[in-house]
Image: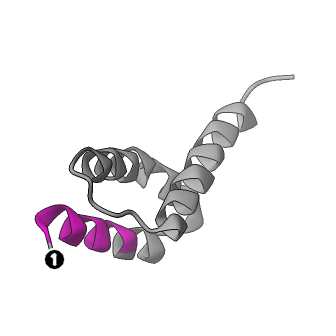
Amino acid sequence: MTSLTMQLHALLLEIKATNRADRCALQPRLDRLIREMKAQALPVAPDTRVLNTKLRDEAIEAQFDNLPV
């Protein structure tokens, strides 16, 4: 297991242990790890990519939740 793979595994465990409201704050780290793994031609599980997209969407949505109407 490479260092990036171990980091990804640890981050995924952290995301699962974090409450839903705070998970989107971890998305930039997940995105960075995925990009680094792709750059080194390491495989990234489709579930991990889906989670990254889901967290990114949640973060974007959260930005609009506090806008006055």
Magenta part of the chain: 2-12
Residue 18 within the segment the image draws in magenta: no
The C terminus, quarter of image = top right
In this orientation, which residue lies closer to the viewer: 50 or 58? 50
Residue 7 within the segment the image draws in magenta: yes
Residue 2 location, quadrant: bottom left
Left or right of residue 67, residue 3 in this image: left
- Residue at 39% across / 44% down in the picture? 28
The residue labelled by disc 1 is: 1
Residue 42 location, quadrant: bottom left
User: Which residue in the rendered view is the most extreme toward the left?
Assistant: 3
Residue 3 location, quadrant: bottom left
Q: How many marks?
A: 1
The amino acid marked with disc number 1 is Met
In this orientation, which residue lies closer to the viewer: 43 or 23? 43
Left or right of residue 3, residue 50 in this image: right
Q: Secondary structure at mark 1?
A: loop
- Residue at 38% across / 53% down in the picture? 30
- Residue at 65% across / 41% down in the picture? 62
Q: Position of residue 53 (x, y in %)?
A: 58, 51
User: Which residue in the rendered view is the most extreme toward the top?
Assistant: 69
Q: Is residue 40 above or below residue 67?
A: below
The N terminus, quarter of image = bottom left
- Residue at 38% across / 70% down in the picture? 12
Q: How is the image coloured?
A: one colour
In this orientation, which residue lies closer to the viewer: 52 or 58? 52
